[in-house]
Structures are given as C-alpha cells and as structure tokens.
Image (cartoon, coloured by chain):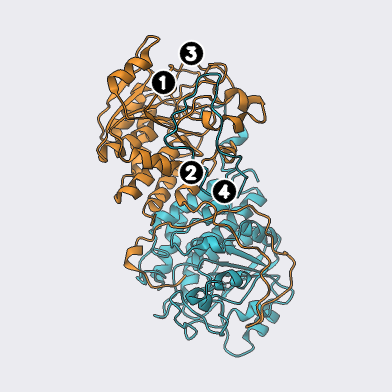
Chain colours: A cyan, B orange
Amino acid sequence: MTMEAPAALLPAPFTVSMMKSPGQTRNARSRSRCIVGLRPATRASALPDLGADPIDHLLALDPGGRGIGRFFQPGGARRAADTLRRARRVLVTTGFVVDSGAAETDGPPGAAVLGRALRALGAEVRYVTDAVTAPVLSAALTALGEAADVIAWPDGDDAARRLLASERPTHLVAIERPGRARDGTYRNMRGADVSEWNAGIDELFVRAGRVTTVGVGDGGNEIGMGNVRARLAKGGGLAARIASVVSVDHLVVAGVSNWGAYGIVAHLGRLAGRPLLHTPDDERRLVTACVAAGACDGVTRRREPTVDGLALDTHAALVTLLGVAAKARA
Amino acid sequence: MTMEAPAALLPAPFTVSMMKSPGQTRNARSRSRCIVGLRPATRASALPDLGADPIDHLLALDPGGRGIGRFFQPGGARRAADTLRRARRVLVTTGFVVDSGAAETDGPPGAAVLGRALRALGAEVRYVTDAVTAPVLSAALTALGEAADVIAWPDGDDAARRLLASERPTHLVAIERPGRARDGTYRNMRGADVSEWNAGIDELFVRAGRVTTVGVGDGGNEIGMGNVRARLAKGGGLAARIASVVSVDHLVVAGVSNWGAYGIVAHLGRLAGRPLLHTPDDERRLVTACVAAGACDGVTRRREPTVDGLALDTHAALVTLLGVAAKARA
C-alpha cells in the first residue's frame, strides 16, 4: 500500500473490517489470465459488510475453542459502553472460584480495568466479591494504582437486597461471575457443582429492578448468559446443564472474559475520545499480581501467570491490538 | 471460564470464531428480569457461523481504514496455503516503490517469511524485484538467516518470458507488488503514476500460463486485484482508477499486505503440523533491517521502523496472535 498520510490517520487506526462465510472459492485451477484492458469476469459475488467493528473481531477470537460463535453478541461491547459511559454509581462483581477453592485469573483484571475507566469518566465504582476472590481483585486494583474498594459479600439471605439498598447502584456489572443454572446451582465448564465455593452474588442481578445490568462471559455459565440460554441449551448435554438462567440488559461475549471487559473499555475510550485502555505492560502486571495474591489459571489450574491456558504474551498482544482498534473512527 | 484442561488443548489455540452484522440489539431499556427457572425469551435469532477461521479474523482487521471489507477474500489465505504446500519451484516478487524512489516496508518482510516457510517445506524459492527494493528484500532475508537469492529484474521487453523460461517456476507469488491499472500504468493509493519507479514484473503473472499464481494485497492496486476489480471499480473515482487488472489464481487480502503473507504461513504451519511462522522478535528485526537498507513507511514516507503507519508493537502483536491461531485445530 502506498498513499499519502492524512494527518488524522496517524497512527492509523483499525476502522473497517468484515467477515464472511467461506464458499466463494475461485476455481483453483482456473487458467484464465488477465490481458490488460480485458479483465476476467469476477466470479465472487458481492460481500455483505458483516461485522464492521474491529473490536468485535478481536473479541470473537475463541482461543478456548468453546464455540462462542453460537452465542457471540455482535455490537454487545459497544452497547455496554453506551450505557456505562454516563453511569453514576457502578457496582462491579467478578470471581469464578474453581473447585479447588482458588479464584481464577480471568475476571479480576477485566473488572479492575473497566472499573478504572469508569472512574476516569466520573462514575463512583465499588466492587463486590466473595472471600476467596477479594484479595485477588484487590491485588489487580492495586496493580493499576486504584483504591481496592472491595466489599466482601455479606452473609444472610437478604444480602442482595441490603446491598442494593445501601449502594444504590445505577449499574451492575458482572465479569466472569457464576450465574445459576436452571437447577439453581453454579456449575463449572465440566458440569461440576461449585456452589459451595461461590456466593450467591447473581441474586443482585435477579433483583436488579430498574438498575441497568451488564454481563461479560465466555463459557455460558456466567451471569448474563440467560440472554442466550435457548441457544446454549439447544443441543442438550453439558452446555444445557451449565447454562445460566440469569439475564442482563447488555451481554458481552468474548473468547476470554477479561477481553470482553477490555472491549467495553476500548469502546468507552472511542466514545470519550481519549485512551482509557490499559497497556500491554499493565496486563502483564495485572495477571502476575493476581497470581501472587492466590489466583490460578482456570484451565490449567496452575498458579502461574496465564489466563485460560494462554500465555501473557497472547493477552498483551490482544491489548495492543484493542488499543489500536480503540483509536478507530467510529 | 472454569474447566479441566484437556492435554491437547494446551496452549489453548484459537479454534472457532464468528462474525455477524450488528442489528440484533436487545432492547436496551428492557426491564424483563430472569427468575430462576423461568427464563426470558431470547430475542436474538440464531447466528450463522460466519468466518470460522481465526486467521481470517486477524487478516480482516483493517488498520488503514481502506474498506477492505469490500474485497476481503474469506478462505483466501487457506487456499493459497493449500496450493503452496507442495510447491516445487516458487518465484516470489514484492516491492512497492513509492514515488520518492524508496521501497516501502510493507512487502519484503512478508516475502521473506513466506519464502522461508516454503523452503522449510522443501520448495526451491527465489525472489525477483527491481533495483530499489532488492537491497531491502535482501536485508529481510538476511535478518531471517535466509540466503538472499534475489534476482534483479532484467532489462528488455521480453524479461518476463525469459525469466519464466529460465526459472521454470511451478508457482508465482506477489506480495504488495504493483499491478497495472486499466490504463497500463502503476498507480499509488493517491492515484499518482508510479510506473517510472516500478518495473513491469506483473508481466510474469499476465504470462503465467500453467504456472499457479498467488497475489497478496491491501489496497486494490496490487498484482491479484484483477480478481475483484469489478467490486473495486463499482463506485468509480480513485478506487476504479488505481484498481489493478492483473488477476491470480488465489487472492489474499489483508489489512496490511505483510499480514496476508503471514496468514498464508500460519495456514502452512497448521497444515504441516509444525510452527513455520516467525516470532514477534523476528518481526521487529525484519522491519528494522528493511529500514536500515533504505526502506520507508509507505504511509508516513518516513524512514523509520513502522509499516503502513503502524508501530512495530502492533505488527508484533498480530504475529503473536497469528501464532496462536496457527495452532488451532483445523
């Protein structure tokens, strides 16, 4: 490509993209050749402009191979950003406690990055999670230089009602937080009941009333997946058994839940016209801090700085490209 | 996400993804809430599985905002890899000389990375370009530890015929190489005539006969864009004026041409079951070596280690994610 650089284009941002089903295969053995001035007929039909949002392109990458294509939400991150942009009081929850009793590394980094961005836009942001995840989330916030304003989920059956009354959030956000399945239990991706390890924080979303709710997930068993449960449950089996019934106003799906939260922040930055996303170096520090505070990888179950079995380099690369995408002309 | 790690999944590769047009907006002000066991109706219809190839997702990112969605080729990189996988003698050309007389940084790195992969798979690979790009391409090859087997485009009207006769390639590959427009000139993205600076190497493709041809481009004015010229020319104007009429058997479109070449290599690695892609550090060394040998950024026209106005970090990040995608279960 060779062109003059319009000043507004530097650094050149991601702006337009598309994706289309394969099938428009040009005949591989075609021998028709171009003769200048006599071009061959184009055999491929016009391509529809599918998925014009480069942020969605990145969120739709599916490193875990969970088939998120079945329930991916085009435009979901943008819609979440639209509503969160002017939020006044946001209560953020995260934390998926694996059955070994350790919090996983997916979730707290996303919560911290999104919370920081919302604070930068003027919102009051507090966090709520249970005892196992609290130190991990606090470590993530501290790594970003944010106050660790983490509320421990209170005991008692009416915890959700009391918390909603005392915090009076305008928005509730859940990032990689268990949502109850149809049988009322929390299930991990293998179908194991992890209710013992995870407090009933999804009750906040069930009782949200007029509070706007946002959910981010990657597996189907998180708060928010009630929106797509019909699709998840269609084939029956494990997916149907673990699928959460807890719905939200705005569902964001990504290959890794942290990425979904980062995608919302990329959109917030685009809307606000200033950088709100963290840096690739921040990403490394965030995940490392979570592990130091006791978190483990949700896939490998190892206490090492990876997320969903993917090396730090992969997450840092995703953050780099999201940062470029965030500068795109909307 | 919380699941047990199947051994084959680590490091978890990109496997499935999709993309769809926005429009399935759930009512933002919806107040319907989930009651456990009584899930709300899902308003979004089933999503078609569009673009299941994560490599395509990455190639379709469009940092220059050139609207490559209009002519992106889903499956193009895979089809190119399918034919190149068993190539015997490959002649690779690259090099877009901007009108200042310097070669741009997009092209030679892609040519070197693809050429190295093809050699690793057993092909004989030679390169041909003109005098301005030759030292840049040689520097890229040397940076990868490859022999700089670069043929200088010979003088004379029958250069293409003679080269095809002497090299007897089974495959011709062009990466970011000017292809003539309908009026027979080479045009840059502004529409300026750059024929003076770029040799008529596209004649190889016009005369290819039974040789299989592959073209990689990002702007519409490169060898291979004859395949999609009808689409490019539809709106008239600049796009129609610069669009190349030179077609190929397999066209690969990407946001940056280097990325298209890397996408082919990612597919070759997937097909061969072994890593063939370069590393993010290689990427940095490649571009830096090109600039040291006289190349400039095709967008900024500055002699600095950027490609199409994008910082090295962006290209390194793309290579990181392509490396993960290359490990995907096909």
- CA distance for labels 4 and 2: 11 Å
The front one of A281 and B230 is B230
User: Which residue does the numbered mark 1 point to in the structure image?
Assistant: B207
Of callouts 2 and 3, which one flags the residue occurring earlier in the amino acid sequence? 2
Tell me the mark number nearer the camera, choosing from 3 and 1: 1
Q: Which mark is residue A54?
A: 4
Q: Which mark is residue A45?
A: none
Chain designation of label 1: B
Q: State the residue lying farthest toward the bottom.
A: A156
Q: Which mark is residue B196?
A: 3
User: Where, quadrant-wise, is the C terminus of chain B in this rendering?
Assistant: bottom left
The front one of B263 and A224 is B263
Percent across and percent down for residue A64 are 43, 63
User: For mark 2, does the 10 Å Cα neighbourhood hold few (<14), some (14 to 19), or many (20 or more) residues?
Assistant: many
- CA distance for labels 2 and 3: 31 Å
- The reply to whether label 2 and label 1 mark residues of one chain is yes
In the displayed structure, does residue B260 sit left or right of residue A59? left
Chain designation of label 3: B
